Amino acid sequence: MIYLLDMFGVAVFAVSGALTAGRRGMDLFGVTVVAVVTAVGGGTLRDVLLDRPVF
């Protein structure tokens, strides 16, 4: 259950980044890069704040 919630959180970060990039008029590559960076960065920040092992 925790793993599914973890994956859901990463997906939400990715969607958030993709929507923001889309609103700024980026192309598909730009949207993908921003979504990946947002998802990885958000997940890493969450792990650091929860004092969990990163990666």
Image (spheres, rainbow, N blue to C red):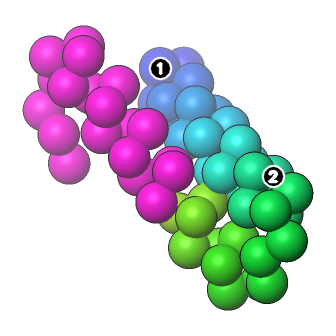
Q: What is the count of numbered marks?
A: 2
Above-or-below relation of 21 to 16? below
Residue 13, horizontal then vertical, whole percent: 60, 41
Residue at 58% over, 64% down: 34
Residue 11, horizontal then vertical, whole percent: 64, 44
Above-or-below relation of 5 to 24? above
**In the figure, residue 51 lies in which quadrant?**
top left
* Viewer-proximal residue among 53 and 48: 48
Q: Which residue is mark 2?
A: 19
Image position of 12 (left or right of 44): right
* Viewer-proximal residue among 1 and 26: 26
Mark 1 burial class by Cα count in 10 Å: few <14, some 14-19, many 20+: few
Q: Which mark is residue 2?
A: 1
Residue at 40% over, 38% down: 43
For the view shown, which residue lies furthest in the top direction? 50
Q: Quadrant of the N terminus?
A: top right
Q: Amino acid at mark 1?
A: Ile
How far apart marks 1 and 2 lie (CA) works out to 26 Å
